[in-house]
Image (cartoon, rainbow, N blue to C red):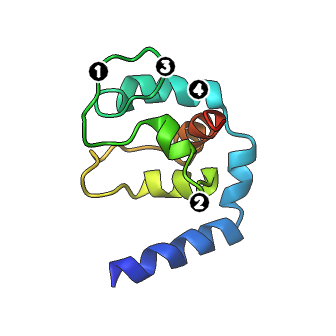
Amino acid sequence: MRARVRPILALLAMLIGFSGSAAAADADHGADLAKRWCASCHVVADGQSQASVDVPSFASVARRPNFSPERLAFFLLDPHPKMPNFPLSRTEASDIAAYIGSLRP
């Protein structure tokens, strides 16, 4: 049931304007948050020398063909079970997603 609910919630969030908040997202703030909260598992920036082997780098997430800052921000609000439960606000999730989006080539 949960697998069917997530796409519906993502669509609903985009329809009610969640995607509009991503346009005003602050990628620099997202980079600061990522370095503080995400760098213990993910490579979040060039020059980072340590991360978990089995998790994607932020650059590889940004290069995915279906990457969308809006979908990623929504995902961060309801993270994958393997991710720690960080209490991100909508603004923080949008900022981190904007930072990851800024890494697209």
Asked if marks 2 and 4 touch (Cβ < 8 Å), the reply is: no
Residue 66, label in figure: 2
- C-alpha gap between disc 3 and disc 1: 11 Å
Asked if marks 3 and 4 touch (Cβ < 8 Å), the reply is: no
Question: Measured from the top left, where is residue 87 in percent x and y?
Answer: 37, 44
Please name the amino acid that badge 3 sits on. Asp
Question: Measured from the top left, where is residue 83 in percent x and y?
Answer: 29, 48
Task: Label 1, secondary structure: give it.
Answer: loop
- C-alpha gap between disc 1 and disc 2: 27 Å
Task: Label 3, secondary structure: give it.
Answer: loop
N-terminal-most mark, 4 or 1? 4
* Circle 1 residues within 10 Å: few <14, some 14–19, many ≥20: few
Residue 50, label in figure: 1
Question: Where is 104 relative to 70, above or below?
Answer: above
| Count of marks placed on residues | 4
Of 87 and 70, nearer the camera is: 70
Query: Residue at (45%, 73%) from the top-left corner?
Result: 6
Asked if marks 1 and 2 touch (Cβ < 8 Å), the reply is: no
Determine which quarter of the picture holds residue 3.
Answer: bottom left
- C-alpha gap between disc 2 and disc 4: 24 Å
Query: Residue at (36%, 27%) from the top-left corner?
Result: 39
Residue 46, label in figure: 3
